[in-house]
Image (spheres, rainbow, N blue to C red):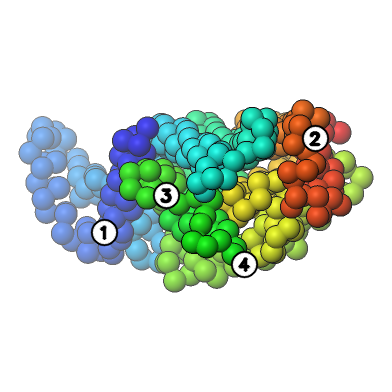
Amino acid sequence: MMRILLLTLAYIVATCNAAAAAQMSVGLRQRMLTPIVVGVRRATMNSSQQRYATKSDLIQPSVTSVSRGGTAICDSKPPVKLLQWAYAAAGMATTAGWGTMAYTTIRDNQPAGAMMPCWQHPVFARIGAMSAASLILGSFASLAATCCESDAESWEELGDSSPSFRRQNLALATTGVASSLWVRFADVVTKIPGSNPVASHQSYSGIMQSRLIGAYGSAGLLGALVWARCLPEDSRNPLTWPKRIGDGVSKAIVSIAPKDVNDPVQVKYALITSSMLIFTGMQTVCNMPVSVIPSWTSRRLSRAFPIYTFLGAVTAFDLKEATENGRILVDKNYRYLSSGIKGFGALYLGARAGAICFDPSFPEHFGMVNQVPGLAVAAMLMVGLTLRSDER
C-alpha cells in the first residue's frame, strides 16, 4: 500500500513540475519547433501530399495546450486509475494507523502501573474511538469514486467534477498533518498532570513512530498535492492559497444554515456540521473534563479525536450542499460520505450503550464523564442525528 501511495505522489510531483516547465509563450515555442517539425513532416509525406500541404498542416503540436493571455498552459490528463489505488492505499494506511493508536493507547500499563478496572472497559473505549475510522474510509472512498466516474481531460476538470473533491482533499491533508504532529508529540499531549516522575499515557519512538508518521504524512501529502494540482490556473500561486482557504472557510461557516428549513435532511446535516465543529473546538481548546466529550477517552485520545470530528464536520457540510443541490441520492461519492457519517454514529452510540449497560466499572471509573453528564447526553443526542435516513 505504501509503495502505491509513494509512486502516486512521485508521479503527481513530476507532472506538476512538467506542467510548470511547459508554461512558455506560444510564439517562442512555435519559432523553436517549426523548422524541425516541418522537416520531419515533409520527410514522411509523399510528393502529392507535399504539393498541397500548407505550413499550418505541417506543424503538429506535441502537447495539448490552452492559450491564456498569450501563455501556453500544458495541463496533463490526471491518472485517475492510479489515483483510485492511491486513495485506497491511503485510506487503509490511515485507518490502520488510527487503529494502532487506539489499541496501544487504551490498554493496561499506559503508563506503567495504570491498570484498567475490567476487560470490558478498554473494549468499549476502543470501539468508540474507532468510530472515526468510518469517517476516514468514507472520505477516501468518496474521492476514489469521483476519480472512477470522472472522464476529466485535465486536473482542473477533475477538481470541478464534484463540489466536494477539492474540499475533501484539503480536509484529509489537514488531518494527515495533525495526526502526524499528535504522534510526534504524544508524550506531551497525553502527559498526566502532577505525575512524579513525569508520566504520559502514550509516547511513540523508533520504528513505530516512523511508521505512523509515514502513514499519516503520506496520506496528507497525497491530499495536499491533488488539491493544489486541481486548482484553477489563476489560483496555483502558493502565495494565494492562504487567502483562498480563508475565503472558503469563511464562506462555509456562514453557509452552514440550511437553505430550506422545511427539508429535514438539510436541517440534519446542518446540525451535524455545527455539532462536529463544536466538538472539535471543545476537545482542542477546553480543559478537562470538558475536552473528554465526545470521545470518553480521558487524556488518552481526547486530543486526537477532534482531528476526525473536524473531518466529520467537513463531510456533513458536503452532504448538506449535496442535499440542497439534489445530488445526495444520485452521486456515488456522496453515498460513501453518507455511509461514513452513519457508520460513525452507529459505532459511537453502540460503544456508549455498551459502556453504560455492560461495563461493570460504570459509572465509578468514568470520573471525567461523570463531571459533565449534560454534555455527554447532548453529544449522544446530536450523534443520534447521523442515523436518520437521507430520504425526506
Mark 2 vs 3: CB contact within 8 A: no
User: Tag 1: Cα neighbours inside 10 Å, few (<14), some, or many (≥20)?
Assistant: few
Real-space Cα distance between discs 4 and 3? 37 Å
Q: Amino acid at mark 2?
A: Ile
Residue 72: image quadrant is bottom left
Q: Nearer the viewer, mark 2 or mark 1?
A: 2
At mark 2, the secondary structure is helix
Q: Which residue is mark 2?
A: 356
Real-space Cα distance between discs 4 and 1? 29 Å
* Residue 227 falls left or right of residue 14: right
Where in the figure is residue 129, as x and y percent of width and height?
63, 40
Q: Which residue is mark 3?
A: 204
* Residue 276 falls left or right of residue 220: right
Q: Amino acid at mark 1?
A: Ala
User: Tag 2: Cα neighbours inside 10 Å, few (<14), some, or many (≥20)?
Assistant: some
Q: Which residue is mark 4?
A: 247
Instruction: Give whichever of 300, 99 is nearer the camera.
Output: 300
Q: Earlier in the sequence, mark 2 or mark 1?
A: 1
